[in-house]
Amino acid sequence: MYYNRKISVLVLLVVIIISACSTPHHTNTLIFGTNTKFAIDIAADPTGNPSLTVGYKRQEAVWMPLLANKDNNGTPNLDKGFLFLGKQDTQIQDTYSVLASFGATFSGGSTMGIETQGAKVSTGGGLAQFFATGLAARKLAETGGSRLVSVQPDGGVSEEIKMRAAELTASWDNKISLIVAYVQKDGKVDQDRLSMLLKDTGLEASDFFKQLPGKDINILRDALKDKYINNVDALSRNIK
Amino acid sequence: MSYLAIDIFRNKMTAETTAEALRISGRKNVVIKEKDSIIVNDCQAEPHKALVDIETTPLFIIISEK
């Protein structure tokens, strides 16, 4: 009994001594675990109305290294030579990239009376979840992360629509090139050409376009590719 | 996060095609909302597309992250 108590005190002292050592700037260990249980129960009552019960249980645990981006003096610590680092190109860096996703769709239905003639009722739903860190999280945020694990990732887009969309995108690119060629003069936006371009497009009163004459043509190009892309068709019709 | 009405269509396929093209072009969170009518006070759509439904056919409105 005496020895047991002595050992306990010794162990306690060792733990205290170890924990009193200097705190590391960061740890390289990342542990992630997820456990998802998903169950559905679909049934139809005698009136034909379907009922759908969803059971969903999720457990998640993560031990995440928090990179010490700055020391106590506020000096960036990125030159400390971390062993593991997510990198994109040479400038963008972040902690480890982890991505875990889970998605499910469920539906049910029933027909009253004769199958081909009876009233049909149906119900359904879906769920999606994801966990992301580092560059994976950044990418998800940039590209609308929910679509990645959405139960309808492409909004139910068919191949035909994808093909038409690709054609439309190519058409926009072509029209943007034409617009830029029409409006530019020595790499700058020409005021007279811009006025002709904006006629009857509803953009004449836009502050952006009012301030555009004389500015770098690439400002217009970038705006057409982004904020004003849905105006490209109307603008291109004014090219004489 | 704020959203913006990008365009309004009467034809569903045209709306879906445009929405997908916008996604390809890098627009974030592009979705289509089906509405019976809409009153447009301020949007980037061409003036003639700022429709209020008068034929009781649904309108397909593309919205996106601003």
Image (tube, rainbow, N blue to C red):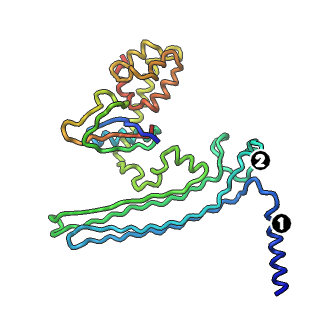
Amino acid type shown at disc 1: Ile
Q: Position of residue A27 (x, y in %)?
A: 72, 57
Identify the chain of the residue marked 1, using the numbered disc in the image. Answer: A
- Give the residue pinned by disc 1: A17
Residue beneath disc 2? A80
Residue A204 location, quadrant: top left
* Residue A166 place in picture, x, y as percent: 40, 39
Q: Is A105 on the left or on the right of B49, as rendered? A: right
Q: Chain of mark 2?
A: A
Mark closer to the observer (2, 1): 1
Picture layout, residue A123 above or below residue B66: below
Q: State which quarter of the image contains the N terminus of chain A.
A: bottom right
Alpha carbon distance from label 2 to label 1: 26 Å
User: Considering only vertical position in the picture, is A171 above or below A150?
Assistant: above
Q: Nearer the viewer, residue A22 or B19?
A: A22
Q: Residue at x 16, y 70 (%)?
A: A113
Q: Secondary structure at mark 2?
A: loop
Drawn side of residue A106 relative to residue A18, left or right: left
* Same chain letter for marks 2 and 1: yes
